[in-house]
Image (cartoon, rainbow, N blue to C red):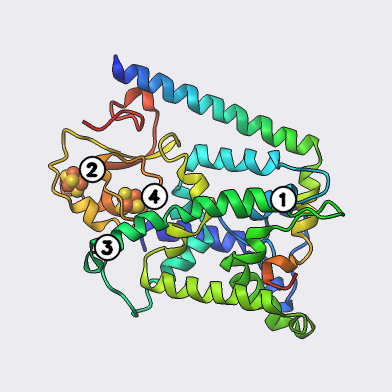
Amino acid sequence: MASRKIIQWLAALGCNAYVPGFLKGRIYRGSFKSVCVPGLNCYSCPGAVASCPLGALQAVIGASRYSISYYAIGLMVGFGLLFGRMVCGFLCPFGLVQELLRKIPFFRAKPSARGAGFALFAKRARLVKYVLLLVFVLALPLLTKGELGVGAPAFCKYICPAGTITAGGPLLAANPPMREALGWLFALKTLIALATVLGCVAVYRFFCKFLCPLGAFYGLFNKIALYQIRIDHEKCSHCGTCAQVCQMGVDPSLGCGSAECVRCKDCVKACPASALSAGFRDESHCKNSPLTKTP
Amino acid sequence: MKHSTSAWRLKAIRLLLFAVSVIFILAGWHRGEIRTVLIKATRICLECIGIG
Ligand code: SF4
Ligand code: SF4
């Protein structure tokens, strides 16, 4: 198994190591839950041993005492600075779920078969995740505060398919009384979760590409993160192989700071000229700094 | 020359963001945000599962 896959499995199992939660239909209540993991991992998933950064951010913004979460933003900036979207490619449990869904042999049209119209639509649709970050994660928990001063975690409440699938699924299956409280909100979230699952079967990392506010945030750090994919322009023959293998629609030969790159390293392995490399490195010795423009 | 300016600029941005990260985490801890996160994360989040 490729080393990235091993790390993905270890991260997903490590983040969800509370086995009794799955067996008894309850969640872990230890103090480690005050810590956020880097990836999207619902804290109400029965196995979750720590918190989801997006959930923590909304919980604090929506609390009566606060209007911003320095803690969650500080952690997210730290993760972004270290890893950028390597979090998505290596550490996010929901990223692994999406890659597994993509293995289902159904609707598997290659990106090249979808045409230029689809590519343009996909490029625009990628902006949706930034809108979700600004509106549902940052603004609505603040703006929906009522008389008690408590705002709704709008992304978790109305959209997050990870919550519906990994928390709602097992908890509702194990707790019949909870099922009696289901209504239109659950119907809406189930529809979104189903659409996401179908999307992930049809399109590689559909949720990462179009909907994930956490990926949108970490993408802002791809140019400056310590973990980098880099290109040696002297070795590159412009053969286009890297752009062809990239399932996130990135052309790394044009520079490796794209906010869409999840650092999966498929391009690094495919490059016939060994022009691409990946790792944590000190920029001062590198002539291809991510901030240096491509020639 | 251009490369060394770029490397210096990158280092400065990283250092600044590292400082922001540490200061923000400490500020959040000082304001009691960690307790708010813990309380939310140790109760079943009805919004997350689509009930509340
Ligand atoms: S695969 Fe390698 S040689 Fe070909 S364009 Fe990409 S970086 Fe350049
Ligand atoms: S193939 Fe290369 S450019 Fe594309 S997402 Fe993976 S690491 Fe990034």
Which residue matches tag 1? A143
Q: Distance between the residues labelled 3 and 1?
A: 37 Å
Residue type (three-letter) at the residue carrying disc 3? Gly
- Looking at the figure, which quarter contains the N terminus of chain A? bottom left
The numbered disc on residue A287 is none
Image x and y of residue A126, in percent: 42, 55
Same chain for labels 4 and 1? Say yes or no: yes
Tell me: A55 left or right of A220.
right
Asked if residue A113 shows in the view, the reply is yes
Q: Does the residue labelled 2 lie within 8 Å of ligand 1?
A: yes
The numbered disc on residue A260 is 4
Q: Is mark 4 on a helix, strand or loop?
A: loop
Which residue matches tag 2? A253
Q: Does the residue labelled 4 lie within 8 Å of ligand 2?
A: yes
Same chain for labels 1 and 2? Say yes or no: yes
Q: What residue do we see at 44% from left, 75% from top?
A: A198
Circles 3 and 4, Cβ within 8 Å, touching? The answer is no
Upstream in sequence: badge 3 or badge 4? 3
The numbered disc on residue A117 is 3
Furthest toward the right, the residue is: A148
Circles 4 and 2, Cβ within 8 Å, touching? The answer is no
Q: Distance between the residues labelled 3 and 4?
A: 19 Å
The quarter of the displayed image where residue A256 is located: top left
